[in-house]
Amino acid sequence: MPDTEGFVRAAHVLGAGGLVSFPTETVYGLGADARQDAAVARIFEAKQRPTFNPLIVHVADIDAAKRYVIWTDLADRLATAFWPGPLTLVLPLRQDAGLSPLVTADLPTLAIRVPAHPVAQRLLAEFDGPVAAPSANPSGKISPTQAQHVIDGLTGRIEAVVDGGACGVGVESTILGLGDAPTLLRPGGLPQEALEIALGGPLATRSEADPLTAPGQMLSHYAPGATVRLNATETSDHERLLGFGNVEGATLNLSPAADLVEAAANLFLHLHALDAQSDAPIAVSPVPDIGLGRAINDRLRRAAAPRDH
């Protein structure tokens, strides 16, 4: 855990328009003051991220969120149930929000959440402002779950990394749009089933053909340097196996016990490790598409998608 001086310095860097990476319970974020155009533009520059891809704003609590979005009873129910935590809500942007239009990619809505990680909480309290923070990695590459992943990917492009250890959840937040009907825009660290229990009914879902309305929706994303093949029940001689459950011959195993929570926490960590080993193709064992398995499979499908670079 960083000391008080470290948090003060990190907050000062943010206020001065710098970029600070910090841990959340999901992955490490790359933070900038969401009110400063130049600072937010530097996020896109550092990540080489397309500017049509909106960002999530992180705030300290529900009261802070209400300053930037038009709050609803449904938002209040969900935020009370799941914040702080790995849930991002997409709500109409307040006209007086004062955020850089780069944050929303000029959309009329804002993705916003309250992270649960104590380091993120302490930094947001010290900074006392909205922090735009996508994952702290080059765009399209594997998301970082340790400070060293950030350093390896973004050294020389950002001012600071606040090291808070490994991220416990290991996949990005679940994104829920609260428009005409609650819509799952991105599966993530909060299982869909938990949301449906809280809402008392099924969520609407987004089609891949729909326009981008939230982060994490690009087809090719979260990708290692090697090609990725999914649902592998056997491998060829030149492939490395990323296993799940009781499988033989795995180079690494997301969870030998077939525990989806453990698998989510290990997903990006193991992809980083495989990426560092070689560029030999990666075959991935089938992962059940339930609970956190939905988020794992979403990330794996995007990692395996045809590359646009």
Image (cartoon, grey):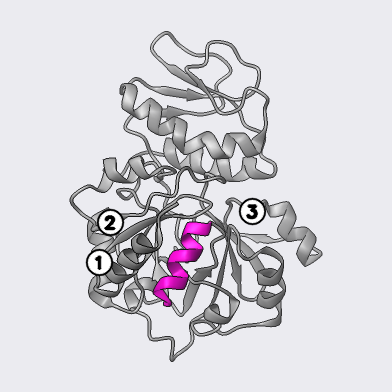
Q: Which residue extends farthest front?
A: 4
Which residue is depicted at the point 35% across and 29% down?
A: 275
Measured in 3D between alpha carbons, the distance from the residue under mark 1 to the one under mark 3, in whole angstroms, is 30 Å
* Residue shown at the point (50%, 46%) measured from the top left: 167
Residue 97 in view in this figure: yes
Q: Give the magenta-colored segment's residue range.
A: 118-129
Query: Would you name the residue on which mark 2 appears?
Result: 160
- Residue that numbered label 3 is attached to: 190
Whether residues under marks 2 and 3 lie with C-beta atoms below 8 angstroms apart, the answer is no
Residue at the extreme left: 156
Tag 2 near tag 1, CB within 8 Å: yes
Residue 143 among magenta residues: no
Q: CA distance from mark 2 to mark 3?
A: 28 Å
Q: Which residue is mark 1?
A: 18
Q: Compare residues 206 and 62 and report the one nearer the observer.
A: 62
Which secondary structure, mark 1? Answer: loop
| Kind of element beneath mark 3 | loop
Task: Tell me: 291 left or right of 185.
Answer: right
Residue at point 25%, 48% (across, down)? 154
**In which quarter of the view is residue 231 placed?**
top right
